[in-house]
Structure formats: C-alpha cells, structure tokens
Amino acid sequence: MSRSKAKVKAGLILTLPSFVVVFAFLFYPIFYLVRMSFYDYFPLRSLEPVFVGLENYRWLISSDIVLHSLWITLAFTIFSVALEVVLGLLVAALMAKLLLEGKSLFDKIFCAAINGLLILPFATPAISAAVAWKMLLQPSFGPVNALLNVQIAWFSEYPLLSIIVADAWKMTPMVLFLFLAGILSIDAAQYEAAKMDGANAIQEFFYLTLPSILPVLGVATAFRAIDAFTKVFDVVYMPTGGGPGNDTEVFPLLVWKTAFDHLRFGQASALAVAAILISLFLCAILLMSRRKA
C-alpha cells in the first residue's frame, strides 16, 4: 500500500466516528422529517401514520395561514435586520472613533466598560430577553409607558413593532461587533489622509468607512436575515404567542403550533421541510453574492 493511500485510510478511520455522530444527530432526523411530511399523523385519531403522498405540500401551497405567516416573517426580517444594521453601524463607528482617538487611561477604561455593556443583550438568553421586554412594555406598570406617560398595550396594539424592537435589542450587538472589527481593520493612515484632505466625520464615514466594510456589511446582513427568517421563536412565543389573532405568527412558530397545538405532525413536517428549503435558498443567494463580490 502506498503512503498516500495509507494516509487516506487512516484519515477515514479517524473521521468515521464524526461521520456517525453527524449522521445520527443531523441527517437521520432530516431524513425522518422528510419521510413524515408524506404522511398524515394525528395521534388522537390513530397511532399509525397514513401515507398521503403530496397532500401536505398541496395544503402548504394553498393555505392562507401559511401565506400570511410567510408575509409576517418576511416583514419581521426586513424591518428587524434593517434596524439592527443601522444601529450597529452608527454605534460601531462611534466606538471605533473612541478606540482609535482615545489616548488616556480613562478613555480605555470607558471603552472597555461600554463594550461589556453592549454585549450583555446578546449574551442574555432569548427567553429571558422576551420576558424582560414583556415586563418593560407591560401596559399597567411597565417602565416604558411610565417614561412616555402613556397607557399603551404595546403587544396588543403594536405587536409586530414590539417584537421587532425586542429582537433588535438582543441581536444588534452581534452585527455591531462584526462592524466594529471591520472598521478597526481599516488602515489608520487612510483616516489621516482623509483628515489632511479636509474631510469631516460624516464624509469619513460615507466615503471611507462604509465602502471599506461593505463585504462585512453584506455578510453580516445576509446571516442575520437567514437567522431572523428561519429561527425567530422565543421573542415571539413568550410575549404574544403569535397573537393577537395571528398578527405575529412567524413561520417557526406556525411549525410549532401545527405540531404541538393541533397535533398535525405530517403538516408540521412539511412546513419544517419548507423552512429548510428556504434556508438553503437564502444560503445559496449569500454564496453567489460573495462569489460575485
């Protein structure tokens, strides 16, 4: 046996346990999910799944509930990601200015403290953040209403806006620190040259900072969009449960309700397969955009 073949064989032997684990915890559940999407399984009626072919997918395509959920999820994704990107860019630019121009010990301690405070929302568990925002926006004793001197039931009157704000509060630090890393990677000599040319802070941001971090901006926005569209659950389930009515019934929550509230596991499996396909489609767009860039 040649040396290269021996290396290949040794590599396969060493990676075989990893393949087994990945298959057991990833591929087999996906295979079972796809298989179940061709069955009608309603445990209150029968313990045996009934093969129905493409019936669950026909329901998925024709259902107004599914279409409404997709539109709600799309609106949530667009506005929450846009808010996170804008806030993240502005705060990252300010933080970079403090880090680059702050020379004293106080400036360094202040920057370290601010960095620690900014990461706290992202480090907070999603369910805890949802409970916190439900209390903050509580109509009777919530501090937001007390501060604004109003009596607004935010999660009833403005449900989608409320969950967008809650999600932006939690996820903005992630994009913020990605943008901050991108800004700090820009050569400081470019900023010195811009100042010598008479550029002010706004001109520096739009003509130097923003063009330099466009690749980071694109990747961070795309990843957040994929994450927001396919994984938003806690921030909706805890405060509103998809309500009032189905005004905040995002797609992952619809999958959960179909399975565990209505016990329609076949339809829920078809919805989950659709969610996987949407994720793959968005990932393909991301990869193609990066390749073109």
Image (cartoon, rainbow, N blue to C red):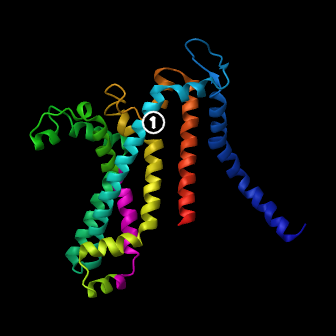
**125 relative to 244, above or below:** below
Q: Is residue 124 visible?
A: no
Q: Is residue 145 visible?
A: yes
Secondary structure, mark 1, is helix
Q: Nearer the viewer, residue 53 or 134?
A: 53
Was residue 265 drawn as part of the magenta stretch in this picture? Answer: no
Report the side of 288 relative to 126 (left or right).
right
Which corner quadrant holds the N terminus? Answer: bottom right
Disc 1 packing (10 Å; few <14; some 14–19; many ≥20): some
Name the residue: 38% across, 57% down: 174
What segment is highlighted magenta in the picture? 171-190
Name the residue: 42% across, 67% down: 214
The majority secondary structure of the magenta stretch comes to helix
Q: Nearer the viewer, residue 122 or 90?
A: 90
Q: Can you identify the residue that label 1 sits on?
A: 70
**212 relative to 238, above or below:** below
